[in-house]
Image (cartoon, rainbow, N blue to C red):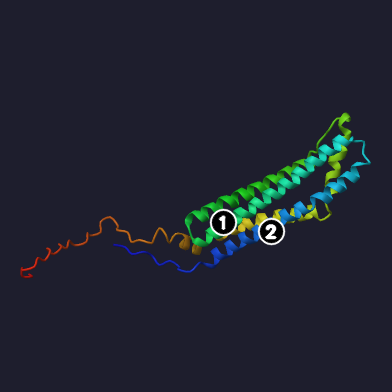
Amino acid sequence: MSYPESVPARRPAVVLLAATVLLVMAVVALAYAVVGLATVGGTVDAFRQAARDTSATTRQIDDVVTLLRVSMVLSAVVAALSALVLVGLFLWLLTGRPGARVATWVVCGLGLLAGCCSVAVLVGERSAPLRLGADERATAELLGLIGDAYPSWWIPLNAGLSAGQGLGYLVVATLLVLPAANAWFGRHRRSAPSVHPGSPPAPFQPSAPPYRPGEDRP
């Protein structure tokens, strides 16, 4: 018969650090969502003011404004949902359940994939800009004004947060692969002793017959 291996009873520092990184990333994502919603009005006003000097009609300007509003609100919603997911992973990781580590790896992989796709789209737009016909010159002018309508710190902030989020996912995934994390998350599978094949069976011990009043005890 084999006995369970000794596992750390306390939460390893690497697991606590990984959970803390997730919590920090959740706070940053939530702050990004709040700031993004707060800048919608100013961005739209700046765009409308710049669009007055173009040849676009009022309807064309309104269409681009709607697209701008939807994109900013959608980004804020995605960031808020990401914050909720990261907080859930933070709490789940602290329980030490093996499924929490697997789920965290999946989220880290999806986060890295989404970041790479965003960078690829940005690079593709820069290298192959949208080409419109002569009759769509007004639309091209409006689309070119969107980048300037954002606050001057908005694009650098997005670039920095994207790099920081990618680095955070890599750090979390790496910490959860370390031996201390493996031992702590695997303690549930080693909580009960196991019998190896070929081990001698436990000796049979017959139970004593029930005692009846009036009978002599053996």
Neighbour tally class for label 1: few under 14, some 14-19, many 20 plus, Cα within 10 Å: many
Q: Could you say which is closer to the camera, residue 59 or residue 190?
A: 59
Give the amino acid type for the residue marked by disc 2 in the picture: Val
Give residue 129's position: percent from left, percent from top.
81, 38
Residue hosting label 2: 28
Give the amino acid type for the residue marked by disc 1 in the picture: Leu
Give residue 200's position: percent from left, percent from top.
22, 60
Residue hosting label 1: 89
The answer to whether residue 156 of the structure is visible from this angle is yes
Q: Residue at x 19, y 62 (%)?
A: 203
The secondary structure type at the circle numbered 1 is helix
Q: In the rendered view, does 147 fall on the left or right side of 12?
A: right
Whether residue 14 is situated above or below residue 169 in the rendered picture? below
Q: In the rendered view, does 140 fall on the left or right side of 161?
A: right
Q: Residue at x 88, y 29 (%)?
A: 135
* N-term-proximal mark, 1 vs 2: 2
Furthest-bottom residue in this view: 217
Q: Could you say which is closer to the camera, residue 216 or residue 2?
A: 216
The N terminus, quarter of image: bottom left
The answer to whether residue 139 of the structure is visible from this angle is no
Give residue 36's position: percent from left, percent from top.
75, 52
Q: Residue at x 38, y 62 (%)?
A: 191
Give residue 218's position: percent from left, percent from top.
7, 70
